[in-house]
Image (cartoon, helix red, strand yellow):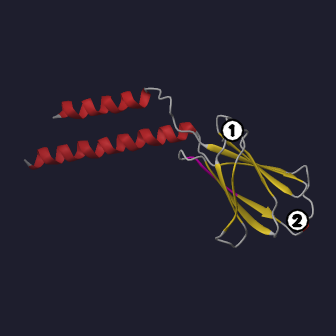
Amino acid sequence: MYAYFWILVLAFLRLLLHPFPGLAHGVVGKIEYQGKCVIVIAQYDTGEPMSYAKVDVYAPDSKIRFQLGRTDRNGCFAFVPDVPGIWKVRVYDGMGHLLSLSIKVSKKSLTSFNKACTYTTSTYKHRWIKAILGIFIILGIFGWIKTLFRFKKAVS
């Protein structure tokens, strides 16, 4: 009975240690201001741009989409806000990667943004933290399975 347990443990360890070409990666967003324009630059955490990703822009206190578009091949998208408040921008590549940004626009900035302003945000956790967390979850699951086998053996 324990042989099955150890076969499962070894199989999962083999899967964990095998380098998959499609390992999950996160997204990084950068906001730049030029004149009255807000420029959103969307990239994967590897530095590759989120080319031709779908972009939704929402005005402050509105559930209706203000603007819809796609990033260019460099992962850039620009829009001109017309009211002050916190604007929400969502960039989605259609493959499970979503970048959500909040941009604060003041009344003063509606006339002209400071060209020197740049804001960068990241929406991913470090890969090592995810890997260690995954290992602990798997070990916890196997611990519960082992405990259930011991309980079942003690009962019978």
Q: Which residue is painted at 42% across and 41% down in the image? A: 136
Of 146 and 106, which appears nearest the observer?
106
Q: Give yes or no for residue 100 being in the magenta stretch.
A: yes
Is 137 displayed left or right of 70 in the figure?
left
Q: Are the residues flagged by discs 1 and 2 in contact, CB closer than 8 Å?
A: no
Q: Earlier in the sequence, mark 1 or mark 2?
A: 1
| Amino acid on which disc 2 is placed | Leu
Point out residue 129 in the picture as x, y percentages from the top left corner: 54, 40
Chain part drawn in magenta: 97-101
Is 119 displayed left or right of 149 in the figure?
right
Q: State the quadrant of the N terminus.
A: top left
Q: Is residue 13 above or below residue 53?
A: above
At mark 1, the secondary structure is: loop
| Amino acid on which disc 1 is placed | Pro
Q: Which residue is painted at 63% across and 44% down in the image? A: 27
Residue 110 is tagged as: 2
Q: Which residue is painted at 71% across and 42% down in the image? A: 75
Q: Give yes or no for residue 6 being in the magenta stretch.
A: no
Of 14 and 77, which appears nearest the observer?
77
Point out residue 40 in the picture as x, y percentages from the top left corner: 75, 50
In space, the residues marked 1 and 2 are separated at their CA atoms by 28 Å
Residue identifier under label 1: 49
Q: Residues within 10 Å of mark 2 (few under 14, many from 20)?
A: some
